[in-house]
Amino acid sequence: MLACLCTVLWHLPAVPALNRTGDPGPGPSIQKTYDLTRYLEHQLRSLAGTYLNYLGPPFNEPDFNPPRLGAETLPRATVNLDVWRSLNDKLRLTQNYEAYSHLLCYLRGLNRQAATAELRRSLAHFCTSLQGLLGSIAGVMAALGYPLPQPLPGTEPTWAPGPAHSDFLQKMDDFWLLKELQTWLWRSAKDFNRLKKKMQPPAAAVTLHLEAHGF
Amino acid sequence: PMALFSVFQTTFLLASLSLRTYQSEVWSEPLPWAPESLKVSINSTRQCLHLQWSVHNLAYHQELKMVFQIEISRIKTSNVIWVEDYSTTVKWNQVLHWSWESKLPLECAKHFLRMRSAVDDAKTPEQRFWSNWSSWEEVDVQNSLGHEPLFVFPKDKLVEEGSNVTICYVSRSQQNNISCYLEGVRMQGEQLGPNVSMFNLNHVAFIRETGTNIYCKVDQGDGIKGIVLFVSKVLEEPKDFSCETQDLMTLNCTWDPGRDTGLLKQLSQSYTLFESFSGKKTLCKHKSWCSWQVAPESQETYNFTLTAENYLRKRSVYLLFNLTHRVHPKAPFNVLFKNVSATNATMTWKVHTIGNYYTLLCQVDLYGEGKVTQHNISVKVDGEHLFGGLEPDTQYMAQVRCANANRFWKWSEWTCQNFTTAEAAPSEAPDVWRNVKSVQGDCVVTLFWKPLSKLQANGKILFYNIVIENLDRSSISKLLSIPAPANGTEVILDQCLYQIHVTANNSVGTSPASVIIVSGDPGNTEVEEERVKGTEDGFSLSWKPQPRNVTGYVVDWCDHPRDPLCDLQWKNLGPNTTSTVVSSGAFRPGVRYNFRIYGISTESVPYLLEKKTGYSQELAPSDNPQVVMSNLTSHSFTLSWKDYSTESQPSFIQGYHVYLKSKAGQCHSGWEKAVLSDDAVCCKYKIDNPKQKTFVVENLQPESFYEFLVTPYTSVGEGPHGAFTKVTTPDEYSPILIRIILPMVFCILLLMIICYLKSQWMKEKCYPDIPDPYKSSVLSLIKSKENPRLTIMNIKDCVPDSIEVLNKQEGTRKSLTETESTKPTYLYLLPTETSYSGPGPCICFENFTYNQAASDSASCGHVPVPPKAPPSQLGLLTSPENLPKSLEKNYMNSLGEIPAGETSLNYVSQLASPTSGDKSSLPTNPPEPALCSEYKMQMAIPLAPWKENWLSSQRIYKTY
């Protein structure tokens, strides 16, 4: 253990991150984005409760878990763990950005339909926060030098129900929209935590290593 | 007869029925006008079956009245659920339609339909029989549903609150158990077929805008299907539908839509306005009002239909009116005032034009001085009205509104404007009164006047002019100008006759003058003061009518008589008045008010007639007089309260009560027994005269304790029974004793002073320090008894042969050995034995380390005493707790530098040392005092630190 510590100390001056001064890098903005996802997660919990009550049972029942019918256009947050691990930073951020772009658009559609003024206000507030998260992700991508994904013309998602779309299915879609949004926020928190750790200077990693040994 | 009639009727009916059956059997051959080309279609949303058919063989332009009988069966043909006769007139080549709404969603079961026809026309009476039934038309929607495992019907239905709704599900698999829920509550259904169940919902209620959720799910699996049932509250008819115009250009129609149907915006009702004469229709954008553009052509009469409509219901209301009868003008504008004087003002305004030929009726209201006046004026374009009879310097509020003069419908909104009239000269003379005092030969006149009322002032009073005119000398007047809002002034006059004029002035002019004559004689003639009894409403005063001519009377008083500025008030009364009631909000209970009644002579000279005094309400005295006691003897004392003012009390003082408490409790003559509030018994003496302010308490016992209290009494009670003053009468003989004792004390003192001054002489005479052996009585005893030749040796007679000098080192530290080797300071003059044991007398010289008590003891024990320790410290040393500390102190002393002269004091108690360290072994009895012969042992105490000392001392003690 002592030898390990000595070796680490011997090599400390050689660690470039420690010698770096001035530009803080994308670290702080990743941290902010992470914080924002946690805040939105908290905000969504309250909003979803209100909205699902507005839809009525069974949508507001805690164990209600319908099949994901009709909500195929929603970006899916769940992904195989190995696939998730193998994602590179660019792809990870791009997926996040695209998902929230779509979800925000759907959410605005939801806001237009809402009957009560209070619900519209809550939804509008959440949309603004989500817009902020989108901007934050765009900021991280720009800091890392990744281009923003361009939306394909004519593929702008809409939330207008088709003539065959029943009201019950519409409610199911609303339910899934909120559920996917929550899953995406959980996933994003993990994504940004991973990115954050990756971007941290190696010195921090040394400290963690020592702590792990029960120092 | 009734029974007979009944039998007859039944027989007739049976006969007619059998005839009809016969007819149909006979004419069952094909009818030339049978329904053909039957087509059935469905409307799933409305749950409707549409039937379409035609009747052939009709001649061109032929019209025939026909009856079509339609039969509908469900699930199977034999299960007929509906039969209806549909009558209509059939034309050549016409396609006929008929609809039927099913309560059960059409997807839930197969439906069958057939029809037949009959002619019901007067033109062809011979053809009145039914045609053959058409073949059954089957309606099966289930086949076209698709391949999904589960369906729920009807899809997203909209119904009114209180309706009955039937719901069904269709499952593709018979193995699955399916449960259906209404808002999360499981429903009990009715099996329609092997994989179809239906549920009847009766009297559905409104739950929420987003509808009632009904869903079915497969028990084992994740299949779920549902519908939303939108329940609407019943659409109400619009109420208070009304239309009016402000400018004959636009009609504004309003109504009350009634309660909300509780549906989402897209399902909510719409409102349509239809005018039947013009045939125009407009869809209203708002729920409660709508605008309608009046056509340029002169349409006067309008017939409106307002229709509220939603998916389920349509409600209409109607309104027929003449446009000119519904004119609601806009509020007048540009309201102005011109030529505003003190009493007049002209108001002008404009109105919005409605049309060239319309006249408006305008209503003008004027508010001012708490009054309202109303005027109606006819106006074309500009309105004008003159207000007369206004009050000067007054703010008025004018408002105007207009309506159609030809046909009144509604007043416009009010338009308001304020204006103030101009000032005018004050109309009344100020009400003036005076107070006259004579100070050092001068006549000090204080003038008071009451501010003019608003009506009298006619503007803001700026100042008061006072003209003082000497009537005797007819000299030039003196002019004073007092700025407002002063309500009085003081002028000093000599003892002459003066006439004073007071006028009030505003910016416009001067009021009439108020004249008052102040005579040289202030007129303070001695008038008897009378008491009056006041009430809550005031004081009722009356006076004798005056024989001489008076122009009136004046009553004056002070509202606050206790204040230096007493706030003089007065009241003017007519010449025929001899009584009045003076009331004031300032009157308080327990305050004495003085009233003066003056008569005003024809020369305007006031002269005092009467004086009255009283209380609006008398209160019991709150304070007792400050009593001074004097002339205290063993049998009496005098009480005096001369400073007590009867005038400033809260009621008329009628006398005083003197209370006296004594231990004896007996009351002498003139006193009576009284029980106080604290049940204490005492004697009471009543003094009837309020002016008597001294009292002598007599018949007291010497050397006795008394308590007294003097309290005033009034008609409403006496003063508080507060603290009694205590007094003890002196001893009867004490004055005599004092006369003897005082000189005696003086003599003794004198003697003592003399003794003190001559103390040295006395000492020498009575008890000298060195007794003179010649004077000793022992000598005389020896002389007389033993040897008469013995005599006292005189020092002068001795011749010394040698001198021994004892060298004693002082101020140096002594070692233990040195201490040991030091010779004792005792010189034995009498022979003693070395091994002395047992107590015995010995003569010793005084050593500083021994106190007098020790040396006086019979055993002459050397009880050691700490040097210079006070007696109290001695006691402390013996207490076990203090021992170590004291010891330490002692040892420290012995360790430290010993100052010169204290060598002999360096002594450590040999008694204390053994007990110091071991408290448990503390001897209860102090050790016997050491004898002189053993004295040396005490010097063996080593000088060591405290703890070691303790051990050492113990050791020493043991050896000892």
Image (cartoon, coloured by chain):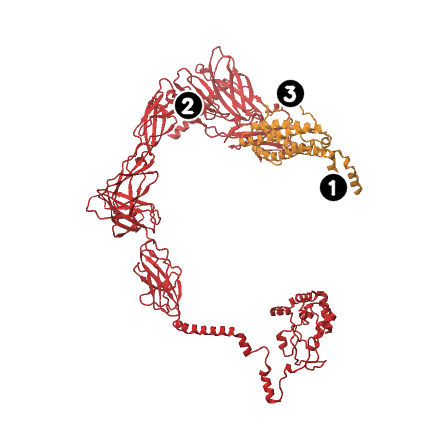
Chain colours: A orange, B red
Image x and y of residue A3, in percent: 80, 41
Q: Quick check: marks 3 and 2 in contact, CB under 8 Å?
A: no
Label 2: which residue? B318
The chain holding disc 2 is: B
The residue sitting at 39% across, 30% down in the picture is: B3
Image x and y of residue B585, in percent: 33, 45
The chain holding disc 3 is: A
Label 1: which residue? A211
Name the one closer to the observer, B274 or B526.
B526
Instruction: Return the disc, 1 or 3, that comes first in the chain's sequence.
Output: 3
Q: In terms of secondary structure, where does tag 2 sit?
A: strand
Name the one closer to the observer, B320 or B810.
B810
Label 3: which residue? A153
Q: In terms of secondary structure, where does tag 1 sit?
A: helix
Q: Quadrant of residue B881?
A: bottom right
Q: Quadrant of residue B372?
A: top left
Same-chain check, marks 2 and 1: no
Q: Looking at numbered disc 1 in the image, what kind of residue is underneath it?
A: Glu
Same-chain check, marks 1 and 3: yes
The chain holding disc 1 is: A
Measured Cα–Cα span from mark 2 to mark 1: 86 Å
